[in-house]
Image (cartoon, rainbow, N blue to C red):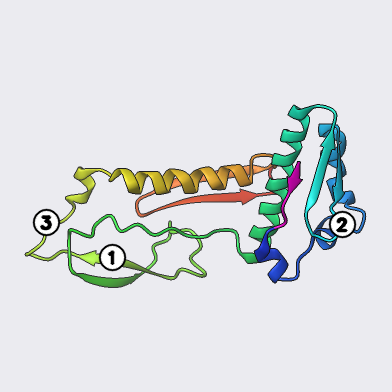
Amino acid sequence: MNVDWPNDLINASVYPKDVFGVDLSQLDPIRTGDEVFIVPIRGTHNLEILGFEARHIEIAEQHCINMIQKVQMNQFGSTHPTHIILDDTEGIDVQLEAAEDWWPNRTTHRIVPRMLPSPIMNEPGSFRIDGLHFTQLSIIQHNIQLALEAIRYDKAHYEFCVRYGCLALRHDPKRK
């Protein structure tokens, strides 16, 4: 089973030997825990997982993919925000406001947009009654799934918040 090293990491000059050590020793917990061999593929930056049981190889592959995702999150930022405008039928003007105290990551997102109600549009707040469109729900579910898969094998304390206006997943490695 081969695990491809992502092109965005290659473009950023981040390679498996830089991340996992020259002999890939950082992958030893996966090697011993999943009873597999993990070796670099010559001429590429990809990894090959070998073992006696297919089930162990698949589990090790998932562990390696999760570790690579962590490297990507550390390199490029921990989140790729998805913005869905729920109140687009409510107004035609946008007002920028200071983020409230509960808003996550207020250091980089100090200002947040809010649609202003307009008399020619729907009733203010009607989007709260209508519910989510299935495509919006699918996008939100997919992003939550990606966040949870990226941290699946980390033992730590996580806080998952759903607040009016945003969803946030916070990782606290000090608390286990």
The vertical placement of 107 against 3, above or below, is: below
Q: Which residues are magenta?
A: 1-5
- The residue to which callout 1 is attached is 114
User: Quick one: which residue is furthest to the left in this view?
Assistant: 120
Q: Which residue is mark 3?
A: 122
| Location of residue 2 in the rendering, given as x and y in whole percent from the top left corner | 75, 46
Q: Which residue is mark 2?
A: 42
Q: Secondary structure at mark 1?
A: strand
Label 2 sits on a secondary structure element that is: loop
Q: Is residue 12 above or below residue 134?
A: below
Q: Residue at x 30, y 58 (%)?
A: 85
Residue 139 in view in this figure:
yes
Toward the front, the furthest residue is: 43
Magenta highlight on residue 3: yes
Pointer 1 or 2: first along the chain: 2
> Image check: 176 left or right of 143?
right
Q: Residue at x 69, y 47 (%)?
A: 65
